[in-house]
Image (spheres, rainbow, N blue to C red):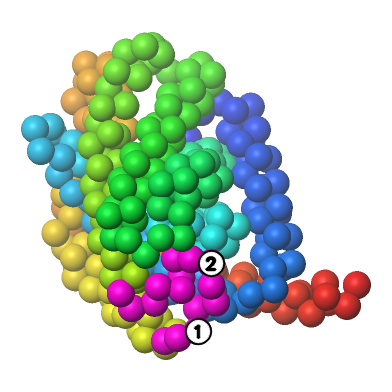
Amino acid sequence: MHMADALLSPMVGGAFWAVSGLLIGYSAKKVSREADASKTPLMGVLGAFVFAAQMINFTIPGTASSGHLGGGLLLTVLLGPYRAFITLASVLIVQCLFFADGGLLALGCNIFNLAFFPAFIAFPFIYRVIAGNSASPRHVAAGSMTAAIAALLMGAFSVVLETVLSGITELPFGTFILFMLPIHLAIGIAEGLATWAVLLFVLKTEPALLNRQPASSRPHFILAIFTVATLIAGGGLSWLASSRPDGLEWSIANVTGKGAVSGVPPNAGTSLSGIIGSLSVLVAAGGIGLVLGKKRPEQKNL
């Protein structure tokens, strides 16, 4: 669901640059004032994991389309909304600047669409209401599925609005919505299942991460597990990624009646890019977390 610059006007793109920038600044301020810094090391590792997971496009049965995980809800459940927003913004910035995924003009929209809705809407108003602080796998499953689907659909709707408001393309609002929402419903179901699977593992190994308690029981273990998972996803599973167009490209192709261009088939460069990109996010998100953590004592002395 990464938007391209070709869909946006400078006014709309610039407006969402400003909105996303303000949200990043607000999130950074909130993180710097938090008393518990135990989750800060996880920002880099989980950000790298999400970067790697986003590289694995999966085929959507019954369509000529593919989708990939967004990771916003997973990050929010494990890190809280403010750290999650900063971490996912770091992922998208690295993808944009170093891997030409999306575009510079579209960066603000992509951060808003993929990070704002799971962090500040789906998590507090859907996941928390359903799952709460429960250690019940059933409640976590229901919360994960419902919130992930809602976040994906809200993000897809936002993409349509941003595109139509830009007026660059001739994509009609109604028809565009009719293709975007069903395909992203399917992607949202996959997102929910993947989120639930990871949270179920965390529930058994580091349950404190799911109930806003300090992550202190086995931090090195959980960091090691996600590091290994990142290397497997970015360096190995990315070879299995589908080369079919993603949900946004597929929707545009169906609205315009033009065939969507398939992506580049995975190759050795894909694995290398996955590892390099994951390391870049690890450094970026982890570095930001450390800087914000160092500001905490100064805030306490004020």
| Residue pointed to by mark 2 | 212
The kind of residue tagged 1 is Ser
Residue 91 in percent (x, y) is at 47, 59
Give the residues in magenta. Answer: 204-218
Is residue 205 a member of the stretch shown in magenta?
A: yes
Residue in the image at 46% along x and 54% along y? 132
Residue in the image at 66% along x and 39% along y? 19
The kind of residue tagged 2 is Arg
Residue nearest the viewer, comparing 10 with 81: 81
| Residue pointed to by mark 1 | 216
Is residue 242 a member of the stretch shown in magenta?
A: no
Q: Is 20 left or right of 174, judged from the image as shown?
A: right
Mark 2 and mark 1: Cα distance apart in space: 12 Å
Residue in the image at 15% along x and 40% along y? 60
Q: Is 301 left or right of 286, judged from the image as shown?
A: right
Mark 2 secondary-structure assignment: loop
Image height of 133 relative to 231, above or below: above
